[in-house]
Image (cartoon, grey):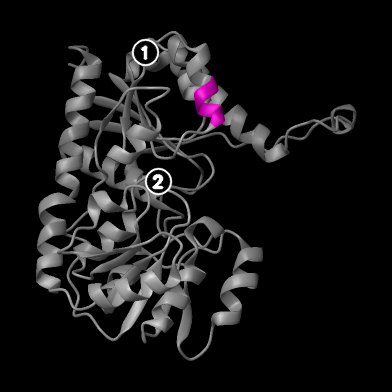
Amino acid sequence: MRICLIASSRFPVGEPFHGGMEAHTALLAEHLMGRGHRVSVFAAPGSDPRLHVEELAIVPFEPSPAARRDVGAMPEVWMAEHHAYLGLMMELARTGKDRFDVIHNNSLHHLPIAMAELVDLPMVSTLHTPPVPWLESALMVTRTPTRFVAVSRHTASAWAHAVAAEVVLNGIDTTRWTPGPGGARAVWTGRIVPEKAPHLAVRAALAAGLDVDVAGPRQDETYFAREIEPLLGDRVRYVGHLGTTELVDLVGRAAVAVVSPVWDEPYGLVAAEAMACGTPVAAFRRGALPEIVTSCTGALATPDDVGALAIAIGQASVLDRADVRKHAVRHLGAERMVSAYEDVYERAAGGRAA
């Protein structure tokens, strides 16, 4: 099939990934191409060129002096992102049906959904987040049905008031996330932002008697300075924003991976990645984490309760690493996810594909 894969205009789809959405897009594109599909990824500048990337035109917006006086004007970065997707959808309206069989919207922007009826192509859109107002508003103005996919049963349920979405659990490359020997330290990985709450993971690990490494992009410097920096020292290390190879090594040498969201995690990719390394997971029982963390791969704790998370760390750290890895390979691999998306594309295209 000829697949148009629309990604984020904000962060490049390439190493080191800024978050799960970028990693998901790269994995999906790579495996689809490996199965013989023709994939074009529309993504932010700086994305991995091996993914057949067509860069979204992120042109800095310079308002006129008169427009700058509008106190209600949207931020310039918002306008640049808006025009990037507007330009893409207008181009697809002109040429898309000659180039593609299906569009897969893997972004969080409202315009691909709102403008779908202008493009004579079926669209599949993945829901990566809880309900957000800009996507709900897009649903109100489009008359062309978009086929929605949710990354977990929890996410599908959260969106049920607005759309009916089938579930395709995210997947990971278990040939790249390989088993490690374990070790004596805990590990936390992900975007360093308040809703991921790594400071709670650090406190829980210390309470459980484990030193801990923290890895990920510092997307909220104010939060990092207020909550993480005061905890750093001999027992708590911030090791930076790492690529996948470095993360596989770090996570594989950990006794346990701690996942500490204070929001309802739509999936929880870092938990699946840890399990593929054989590293058991201790996590707050939030969002979709109960769908992927089982009693043989980790332990779940009462949300936001550091003491309960410390107990879960102790319970998870003694689990058999081979069993953890086996579960990840069997249930969380990329091949299952890609096959499911192929089926969605074929049903959406309805015989359009050559």
Binning the other alpha carbons within 10 Å of mark 1 as few (below 14), some (14 to 19) or many (20 upward) gives few
Task: Indicate whether residue 134 is drawn in magenta.
Answer: yes
Q: CA distance from mark 2 to mark 1?
A: 23 Å
Badge 2 or badge 1: first in the primary sequence:
2
Return the x and y of residue 345 as percentages of the image width and height: 23, 24
Look at the magenta stretch and give its main secondary structure. Answer: helix
- The quarter of the rendered structure image containing the C terminus is top left
Range shown magenta: 133-137
Task: Indicate whether residue 20 is drawn in magenta.
Answer: no
Q: Quick one: 143 or 156, which is closer to the camera? A: 156
- The quarter of the rendered structure image containing the N terminus is top left
**Which quadrant would residue 174 be assigned to in this image?**
bottom left
Reply above or below: 163 against 142.
below
Q: Quick one: 331 or 252, which is closer to the camera? A: 331
**Which quadrant would residue 77 be assigned to in this image?**
top right
Q: Which residue is mark 1?
A: 145
Reply above or below: 141 against 87.
above
Query: Dot 2 lies on which element?
Result: helix
- Residue 63 visible in the current orientation: yes
**Which quadrant would residue 15 be assigned to in this image?**
bottom left
Reply above or below: 222 against 104.
below
Q: Which residue is mark 2?
A: 21
